Amino acid sequence: MTLPEDRLSNLRRLEAESIHIIREVAAEFRNPVMLYSIGKDSGVMLHLAMKAFYPSKPPFPLLHVDTTWKFRDMITFRDETAKRLGLELLVHTNPEGLEKGIGPFSHGSSLHTHVMKTEALKQALDKYGFDAAFGGARRDEEKSRAKERVFSFRNASHGWDPKNQRPELWNLYNARVSKGESIRAFPLSNWTELDIWQYILTENIPMVPLYFAAKRPVVNRDGMLIMVDDERMEIKPGETVEEKMIRFRTLGCYPLTGAIESNADTLEAIVREMLIARTSERQGRLIDQDESASMEKKKREGYF
Amino acid sequence: MSVAEDFYSAEEAVADYVAAQEQKDQLRFLTCGSVDDGKSTLIGRLLYDTKLIFEDQLAALEKDSRRHGTVGEDIDLALLVDGLEAEREQGITIDVAYRFFATDKRKFIVADTPGHEQYTRNMATGASTADLAVLLVDARHGLMVQTRRHAFIASLLGIRHVVLAVNKIDLVNFSEERFNQIKAEFEQFASGFDFETLQAIPMSARYGDNVTGKSEKMPWFAGPTLLEHLEAVQVGEHELEAPFRFPVQWVNRPNLDFRGYSGTVASGRVKVGDEIVVAGPAKTSRVEKIISPLGEVEAARAGDAVTLTLEDEIDISRGDLLADPAARPDVADQLAAHLIWMSDDALLPGRSYLLKNGTKTVNATVSEIKHKINVNTFEHTAGKTLDLNEIAFCNLTTASPIAFDPYEANRTTGAFILIDRMTNATVGAGMVWFALRRATNIHWQALDVNKAARAEKLGQKPVVLWFTGLSGSGKSTIASIVEKKLHLEGRHTYTLDGDNVRHGLNKDLGFSDADRVENIRRVGEVAKLMTDAGLITLVSFISPFKAERQLVRDMLDDGEFIEIFVDTPIDECRKRDPKGLYAKADRGEIKNFTGIDSPYEAPENPELRIENTGDPEVAAQKVLDLLEQKGLLTNSNFVSHGDYI
């Protein structure tokens, strides 16, 4: 089957829409920033930003909120990426959280995420006075995301009010905010996980090695395969560290991110695995499993 | 299967698959109908049948079904779709949600929109980006008022492809007669709309009949299933046939050797060497290079996000529209449009809003509501204001000309949103019908005797002293003293007083919000003429709304509008009550009295704020001191009154 003469393919239509959104933010806001979380969605978003402004560089810095519990490979990849593309990279860690030693093992996933991600993100946005922040979230990820606008308004305390969102018609995005208020912009709103991988494959976008299957040390904890990424991970009685062929479908703090057993060590193999996948990617994230409305709650508090 | 075989087929399969993806296109559609029609269930069914529901989501769904479900023991597919907690609890869909699924042929993006009348704005939002609309009706009830409403809104937003989904056909015994009856009724009704395709399908979303698989229970139906139709329907690309339009988003200037214009091609095509025109200034050039996401290319088409460079250096910035010189857009500052109101605060004609069209944002006012349109009966009714979810045909005036096409011809350059200047909320969505008067034909009468000449003759700098505050705050008393003193100093002044103007120029206006806005607009225009005449104009009006005071400020040149807030507390005003109005308002004899049952929006940054001093002489002196400070009383060449003595 072929497309009628020069009808835009799905990927090209998505690409153009995202570039339009990214340019609109750059043109309308005083001080935008791109949240860079190192994962595949961030990688695609950054790739699109490079295209949107070529031959110029994107007119905004990257921001990484570092919880200090990311996989070591992610940090290496982050620094290499910023250097390779010649972009300014800002890294922020919640100083109070760091001082109190907040971590997922000692304080649980919920408090850790709140202090080291949500609060840290708000601190960073306030510190630099950003009036717009790009995020790589997609509407297909989760139910409350499905209703989020491309330009998502946040009040001065970064909260999201799902019942009082601005209508968003055509590609006419309302970028007006008062002092202290901001917009979270989601250029990948209409992409699905499969679109992301297809695009990575088509465009050959570099990705963190953790997405590709390799032998890695893991323990089975509460039904999830958790990788032993550094010495902070305590092995509990009854647990054993095993070397397994694993990879990750989503990346975050290593103690909160479950691996899947897989032999997919090429992009082609990953896409193939995707096609026969029967579980959605967020299942790999501990933070979403408590309650089906938990994401909506976190977003109201200022989470991405 | 051997490992080698598996490996081979994997490589092969993915290569084929990726090649197929490049050929897959995208269809965006919306579904409308009330929740009782089974709309969420239908989308849940599409996701379920196309295997887009993963196992863990299914587990969560089963859990949720037991908690909130409305279909007993079965999985309630609607719960999958109704995302927000409040919606799940109330069992209604209150916002637009976007869903995604794909088949081998297409990727689909579904805007799931609520059907109740109070959610007209949400439906319009979903429809604005859709190629096709699926209108659900309950086979038992047939066409309802809301079905007509949905068809009307879909048509208004430019959707040309419609599916009439006659759902719950199982509840009328899969009756062919019933289906044909509904279909015929709808076709007759919809003949007035400009739909290119109209496909009626009998279905049961709950049981899956004719959604993705052919129903065995309806052998009489020879048409396609819903999914077959969605996969096959050819939505013509009207924007591709329309003339070239390119709203400039961003000027790309990495160094002195490169000047590019980034944006998304709104319609038509463009290739290297084509002549283009900047709408408005009407400067022309030729396309030198086109940079697309794939690199440098020879041509681009509607929907492509590209960067263009031109052969000539002409002044182009964000908000400009590049166009085909052989088919130019309208450039006007007055236009007629359909407007959907989306805010709890009513539209007030005369109030200044921001209008965003393409990449350009300008100040605009609705100058007149020609008629409102009843969304259920399509009757035209008169109206002075527009409330949430109401639709009207209006005339608008923009502060500077904009370049656009009628919406019917171009869904991108013909669309606009209105933004409230104070709250920044998106309050309206508009579709241009036509330009009322081409700005290119408007020439201001150029007068040799201008404002500067008249002001010089009078030996003063004309300004507007705008006194705002509650009734009884002392505005008029203070203004009167100020005028006397200025007069004694030989200044040329004039006072516009609320009560006096209302006896003459504005005697046709009452005290509703809409009339208050018009009242201030007229006074602003008169003050502007007075300023043009070189006078110092004192305006003493309650002028309760920020937006209107801002409107007048915008009418005048920088520094000419001096806002003086007479900030007397309401209790003090009430005590004074010089005209006995508070007493009347308290007795309910006056409606919409500012401070009682109509709001007063205090200025945030007035040029001068006069707190309750009790002594109007002191207050007046503060005004004169401010004028002195601003240098407004220094440059005169007049002989002061004292010199005569």
Image (cartoon, coloured by chain):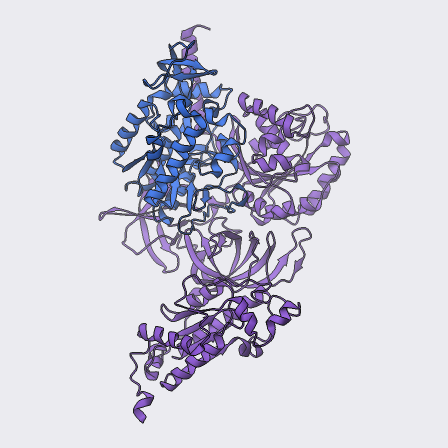
Left or right: residue A16 compared with residue B218: left
Residue A247: x percent and y percent? 39, 18
Residue B343: x percent and y percent? 55, 52
How many numbered marks, from 0 up?
0
Residue B267: x percent and y percent? 44, 46
Q: Is residue A232 visible?
A: yes
Above or below, A193 relative to A244: below
Above or below, A12 relative to A173: above
Please report the residue visible at 41 percent of the width from the left and 71 percent of the height from the top.
B443
Give the position of the C terminus of chain B as an image quadrant: bottom left
Q: Is residue B194 visible?
A: no
Q: Residue furthest top?
A: B2
Q: Residue furthest left?
A: B256
Above or below, A149 relative to B319: above
- Chain in purple colour: B
Residue B295: x percent and y percent? 32, 36
Please report the residue visible at 47 percent of the width from the left and 38 percent of the height from the top.
A301
Tint of chain A:
blue
Q: Quadrant of residue B53?
A: top right
Please report the residue visible at 71 percent of the width from the left and 37 percent of the height from the top.
B138
Please report the residue visible at 37 percent of the width from the left and 83 percent of the height from the top.
B491
Above or below, B496 relative to A62: below
Left or right: residue B443 compared with residue B146: left
Q: Toward the viewer: B286 or B395?
A: B395
Q: Toward the viewer: A76 or A5?
A: A76
Left or right: residue A236 compared with residue B574: left
Q: Toward the viewer: B628 or B520?
A: B628
